[in-house]
Image (tube, rainbow, N blue to C red):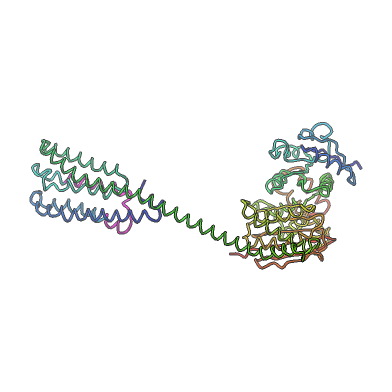
Amino acid sequence: MTPDGLVAERPSLAPALLHSLRVARSVIVLVILVGLVLPHVVADLEVYDPRWTGPAWFAGLLAVAVADAVLVVRRRTWGRARWPAAAFVLALSVWATALLPASALVGPPHQTLGAVGWFGVLLLADTGLAALLGFLGVHVALTVVQLGLADRLDLLTAVDLAVVVAATGGFQLAVGAAGAALDRVAGAATEAARRQAATVTAEEVARQLHDDREERYTRLRGSVLPLLLGIGDGSLSPADPGVQRRAAVEAARLRRLFAEEGDVVDLLAAELGSLVDILEQRGTEVSFSATGERPVPPAAVRGALVDAVAPALLAARRSARVTVSAAGTGVLVGVVTDVADTDVAMVEPAGHEIEVVVVGAEQQTWVEVRWSPSAS
Amino acid sequence: MEPVSIVIVDDHPAIVDGVRAWCAAADPPITVVAWGHEPAVAVSGAGAAADVVLFDLQLETGVPAFDAVGRLVAGGRRVVVYSQAADDATVLRCLETGVSTYLTKAEGREHLIPAVHAAAQDLPYVSPALGGVMAGDRRADRPVLSDREREVLLAWFESDSKNLVAARFGLSVKTIDTYIARVRIKYADVGRPASTKAALVARALQDGLVDLSDL
């Protein structure tokens, strides 16, 4: 997995932690180069022949470390350039080792031996521990080959080499492993943060839904309770057609409230269906048809559409027709009843970009309610 | 004049009985010459000569029998689809195949009898359900309808009453009929050719319902 991929997958926390790690690595390498390696290069100038070659390989390593620091500051990665850069560092190491006299190998002037591994950390640790191990292994192998060419493969040198490799390589691997661990921790932390955000969002949605229902229950209490109390104390007569109509309207509202709890795709059709149920229960034959690709009106608009057709529909006697169709970007609800329009008590639509058309002919009334959402 | 004859392809005995009763009571009468629950009843025996095939799209297999409809239409038969299904895609596919008209089973005698008579004479018949589907058609290759044609179709779908549509637009019922029929002819004039479609268009031209400039 590339570090770029990691950043893309974990947008919040991981990049910040991984960036801190990269800053730490850059500082470590620059401090080692300037604080530990440079004094040796200056002190051992005469060991190199010609003399400029010591500062030359040092400048090469410093250039790579500075380039890395610049990338870190700009929050960019090496990308594919990491591979030629790693090869360049190894080449510098081979060159610097070849410049040294056989007697100076694995001694204090052989500074590249310990320092080069840090460039593996800088360039390759992001791609995983395997690449870093590979880099360190290749470096040690090249050094062993060069020792062989210089005829320095004696036991003492091998022990010295092992000490240097174990000391510096152990450090370098530890920093690389810390990075890998931090990467995992950052991923887990980001995932935890994301889950927490999702929980908070779900709670907020549930709270709003609850408030919304509370509000509607309150509204219902304002209309249903007086009706029930009136019927209970005898001040309203169930035989009165007006009371019957009020009861039917309230029953429809209650059903709508319950319908919203269900998992129904076409909520408008479901709400109208509740009204149709009431009519069918009292023996009115209702045909219900829906056609076209219709948008889903918001809850307030659905309520207003149903409220606008409910009185006409509930006034139907033997038969009624209910339709829902697409109209441009909006919705048309049509209700036709077998009642002359003078008998239908109309409700004024409460805004919501709703128009009502009432047509009467031959003992039939057609109420068309059109919702046309304004372009937004 | 010989009474119109039909063959009923439907797997619901109650539907077959109901349609036979409607046909016996129709004026002018309609003779049911054969019925059965498989398309074969329309291509062999007495059913092969019927003027109109009343076809239930959802037979026992449960899969819409588009292929059987296609074969009947290709054989020059006038097919009235009478189906439970009212979804736009199914209705439009049947129209494209070249059926005479499409009725849903929610649409009873008052639409079925005139639809059969119209089909027998190659006249267009548009039930409210079919009108609703054509008005809501959003396919790229649909026929071009005028705004008024679409309004009238939607109103017909909503009201199921040409009197109400006429009252709403201040037009005569005859004019409303013309608008609706013209849309049906436009649908017959697009897509895959079929002899039944050609017959609808030819009859509409002959009756002056549309002229060539409408097509």
Q: Is residue A20 above or below residue A128?
A: below
Which residue is nearer to you in this view: A184 or B147? A184
Q: Is residue A68 left or right of residue B78?
A: left
* Residue A69 sits inside the magenta stretch: yes
Which residue is nearer to you in this view: A329 or A297? A297
User: In this view, which residue lies farthest toward the right?
Assistant: B1
Query: x and y percent of residue B124 in the render?
Result: 79, 49
Which corner quadrant holds the N terminus of chain B?
top right
Q: Is residue A225 above or below residue B198?
A: below
Does the rendering let one see residue A32?
Answer: yes
Which residue is nearer to you in this view: A210 or A233? A233
Give the residue drawn at x 55%, y 61%: A208
User: In this view, which residue lies farthest toward the top?
Assistant: B45
Give the residue drawn at x 76%, y 37%: B11
Give the residue drawn at x 26%, y 53%: A25
Query: x and y percent of residue B69 in the render?
Result: 73, 39
Q: Main secondary structure of the magenta part?
A: helix
Magenta segment range?
A68-95
User: In this view, which residue lies farthest toward the front?
Assistant: A233
Q: Is residue A360 left or right of residue A51?
A: right
Q: Is residue A219 left or right of residue B172?
A: left
Does the rendering let one see residue B165?
Answer: no
Q: Is residue A121 left or right of residue B143?
A: left
Which residue is nearer to you in this view: B113 or A351? A351
Quarter holding residue B78: top right
Marks counted in the figure total 0
* Residue A28 sits inside the magenta stretch: no
Query: x and y percent of residue A6 in the render?
Result: 38, 50
Query: x and y percent of residue A298 in the render?
Result: 62, 60
